[in-house]
Amino acid sequence: MSPLFRSLAAAPLMALALTALCLGPTSTPSRAATTISHAIALHGAPKYPAGFTTFAYMNPNAPKGGDIRLEAMGTFDSLNPFINKGVTAAGINSIYDTLTIKSDDEPFTQYGLLAEKIERDPADKSWIIYHLNPKARFSDGKPVTSADVVFSFNIIRKDGDPQYKAYYADIASVEALDAQRVKFTFKRDDNPELQLIVGQLQIIPKHYWEKRNFNTTNLDVPVGSGAYTITQVDPGRRITYTRNPQYWGANLPVNRGRDNFNSMTYVYYRDMTVSLEGFKAGQFDYRVEYKAKTWATDYNFPAVKSGLVKKLMIKNENPAGMQAFAFNLRRPLFQDIRVRQALGYAYDFEWANKTMFYNAYTRSDSFFANSELAAKGKPSAEELAILEPFRKQLPASIFSGVPVQPKTDGSGNIRGNLMLAQKLLNDAGWKIQNGKLVDKSGKPFAFEIIIAQPELERVINPFRQNLARLGIDMKIRVVDVPQYIERERKFDFDMTTSRVPQSLSPGNEQRNFWGSSYADQPGSANKGGIKNPVVDALIDQIINAPSREQLVYRTRALDRVLLAGYYVIPQYYLGSDRVAVWDFFERPQVTPKYSIGLDTWWINPKKQADIRARQNQKQK
């Protein structure tokens, strides 16, 4: 499963399901078979029992108050995060609540939020009923009803981003049984994950949207269902969210100790270099640093030396996903696997890590790196049993080991790797002619990589230079954020840099990432255009996994097949988050396993007042 609906980063997705138990809109399932609970876990039992008071990683006595300023990159022109148009404002998810909420110290367990109870039959996974909390209210004070849930689902699936269509593909129907109960019926009964997926649905008010054009970009401030409301919009520059003092759910167990800031303002910058200078000047308060060189050399300004700014390395146990150079397989240039494999030999990670990254990173060797889901070494007996039915469709190497990324000694001399690349290219029909690599018709091997961050040129240039030694002309094109987003949506690129996030519980979102049916659907997450029937079959098996153990084995099998397709050139990952903060934040003693946990932090008002005074004095 992917944290698509509540994360500050989106992302991600999932859906599938179950065969139907036919019930009319006013009927209920047999009480003899049903259970009603406060939470639902994909595998096993929820960690927190009924009647729990708060999550272990939250401080229920955390004081409310203060303001936090955060950075955002690029610009924005929309306050509708659900559609495949425009650029949505950062932080917009804070104005919406979901039926349930995931805990950040379990792989995949959902607890009641807008829904206070979850009704289901453990033996029949073709339906689930969510009982809404009768106290639930939208930000305008009107009650949240099952009609709003039905409306939200239908309009988001109909007019929303294509990722929602993938996520909800196997939901047959949604019915309002009464004002407080909503029933989801599924097309199949072999996907236990779908019962949790529907709980991630963000609920929007029917009374606000039914007379508006949902599928358009605008900056009209919408009515929400979450803890924050939008209070200030400076188009493309900043947006402020203020905690709703009338928020109905502030004292729910899942919220006790969460959402402690009075306001959150996102300040926009055009590039990372300018944003760092903004952080140094006190224009915002919290920064996640993505560049190893910057972290190692540029955080030595006076506020760091005096202790007013703190550097934190927050270890996490999240799967790193895959960060990579991604091929667009829709381009004829990249359809030969030998070509894709050859280009991988031109990327010298070891040299880049030593020379540019201060040896901070680990080479990505899996689409599920930094987790038990990653394939390692020879396939286990369980993995072999999963892969064996596809033996004729897979390269023999999959059955003896996992594809290994090319390695170098870090000296910058990669002549041996380039010779291997050259042989693969020759085998694929490419030859050197007048110093240029050309095909049989004499057409040169040339392509373009698009990026939205100019500072990435420094990282890509050594790769480009190595390709030039093979006679390949790679151009780097820097475009602005809206153009970058639009070109990716339309698959209008040869190569791009890509990061596909993963969770500890992969599921239906894998269809959107790699599934054949989404390869040609504009706006899907299958950026590379992968079409592989074995990948499709393994995704189905992951979605239908009957146990955690089988989920792990099936995901490892998928990992092997994806790696063997050479669909990307893997880059690197870091198993921690580099965070710099102005030193007025306080945190719970327990850090959640799978999150930084910023929404559980709070502000020391005396420290903030002192630091704000110093910042203001400096700016004068």
Image: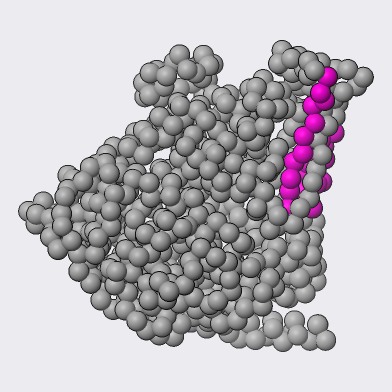
Q: Residue at x 79, y 65 (%)?
A: 274
Is residue 462 covered in magenta? yes
128 to 608, vertically: above or below: above
Q: Is residue 369 visible?
A: no
Q: Residue at x 80, y 31 (%)?
A: 446
Which residue occupies the extreme right position in the image? 434
31 to 327, vertically: above or below: below
- Residue 122 lies, in percent from the top left, at 19, 48
Asked which colour scheme the image uses, the reply is one colour
* Magenta residue span: 442-465
Is residue 175 covered in magenta? no
Count the marks. 0
Q: Nearer the viewer, residue 97 or 505?
A: 97
- Residue 457 lies, in percent from the top left, at 80, 46
Q: Residue at x 80, y 56 (%)?
A: 297
Image quarter (top left, top right, bottom left or bottom right) of the C terminus: bottom right
219 to 324, vertically: above or below: below
Q: Nearer the viewer, residue 394 or 606?
A: 394
- Residue 580 lies, in percent from the top left, at 67, 64
Report the side of 563 relative to 452 (left or right).
left
Q: Nearer the viewer, residue 507 or 181?
A: 181
**Quarter holding residue 141:** bottom left
Q: Residue at x 28, y 53 (%)?
A: 173
Report the side of 144 relative to 420 (left or right).
left
486 to 180, vertically: above or below: above
- Residue 550 lies, in percent from the top left, at 34, 33
Report the side of 96 relative to 276 (left or right).
left
Report the side of 204 relative to 344 (left or right).
left
Q: Is residue 30 visible?
A: yes
Which residue occupies the extreme left position in the image? 32
